[in-house]
Amino acid sequence: MDYSALIQNRKSFRSFTAQPVTYAALEEIDVFFHESCQRLDLSIPVELTVFPSEVHAGLDGIVGYHQIMIGAPAYLLLRSSTGSHARENLGYMMEDLVLKLLDLGYDSCWLNIDDEKVLLERLNLDLDKSVCALIAFGIGKKERKTLRLTIKSMSDIDAEVKRGYFAQKKNIHEMVYLNALGSSEPIAPYLDSYGEHLWRAFYAATLSPSYLNRQPYAFVVKDNICYLIRVHDQFTNDDNAAIGHGIVMLHFAATLKHLIPDSKWCFDVDGTSLALPDGCVAVARYQL
């Protein structure tokens, strides 16, 4: 899989054609999940279940995109045991599956889960693995224009009509800082020292989807360590933030893996040396 290309071509679709997902594709996804899907924590038990379009009606009101249930030919559910960083792990794994689906020619959309217990009960699943991540997938409808909402606050919503499905994202200079969060110290010379590879990894990170397109995170590069920082956002709760962290960590690491094959994200991070402002927390670190 060419992660850099897949991430750049990745789009979220809100509507799908009626064309079913082939059995061969479902088999390949199952094999990928068991043999190749990347994880942050191998110790957390995770299960994958595929559901047909018919579950749509039963999930209305408890899952959706901005509280709107998305009808699709199929749905992927990842669920795991509770534990430290279980949600980050699910976000990481599910985004890897999203990119594999794209590699197979299928589009997808992350769905927000309002109540995981009710979701599992409606799907007749045991509650032993109660941490969940869910996507809708199939062949996306190619519409010429779509309404894109950039939500700054609930009283300040910009609506623009954009061609395609590209949502506005932060650029590298709005997301990546050298030595301190918000620093005006130029990051470009440091990134240049790695050639195009580190630029590509951070660009992939800026393309990561997040709840309400808020992207409430940033990176600080200091002493050849990349720190992922959670930035306070009043509209993003802890669960959605953790899933989003997993997604952005996958985008970054998968793009950079060929350059630094032995490096990985670690959660044993002490953010005190970063002198972060109130409301900001160091989530993980990646050795460059």
Image (cartoon, rainbow, N blue to C red):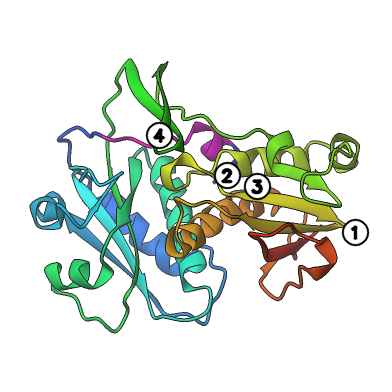
* Residue at 77% from the left image edge and 44% from the top image edge: 182
Q: CA distance from mark 4 to mark 3?
A: 37 Å
**Upstream in sequence: badge 4 or badge 3:** 4
Dot 4 and dot 2 residues touching (CB under 8 Å): no
How would you rate the neighbour count of disc 3 (Cα within 10 Å): few for under 14, some for 14-19, many for 20 or more?
many
Q: Secondary structure at mark 1?
A: loop
Seen from the viewer's position, the closer of residues 145 and 195 is 145
**Closer to the observer: label 4 or label 2?**
4
On the rendered image, what quadrant is the C terminus found in? bottom right
Magenta segment includes 12: yes
Q: In percent of the image, x 42 and y 69: which residue is there? A: 34
Q: Nearer the viewer, residue 43 or 161?
A: 161
Q: Residue at x 68, y 57 (%)?
A: 228
Q: Residue at label 2?
A: 3
Query: As shown in the figure, which amino acid type bears the numbered disc 2?
Result: Tyr
Label drawn at residue 155: 4
CA gap, disc 2 and disc 3: 6 Å
Give the SS element for disc 2: helix
Q: Is residue 162 above or below residue 29?
A: above
| Secondary structure under the numbered disc 3 in the rendered image | helix
Residue marked by disc 1: 223
Q: Residue at x 34, y 44 (%)?
A: 109
Mark 2 to mark 1: distance in Å? 27 Å
Question: Separation of disc 4 and disc 2 at Cα?
Answer: 37 Å
Q: Amino acid at mark 3?
A: Thr
How far apart are the two marked residues, 3 and 1, measured between alpha carbons? Answer: 21 Å
Is tag 4's residue or tag 2's residue first in the polypeptide sequence? 2
- Mark with earlier residue (2, 3): 2
**Callouts 4 and 1 close, C-beta under 8 Å:** no
In the image, taking residue 129 as reference, residue 174 lies left or right, namely right
Label of residue 255 in the image: 3
Please say whether residue 113 is one of the residues in the magenta stretch. no
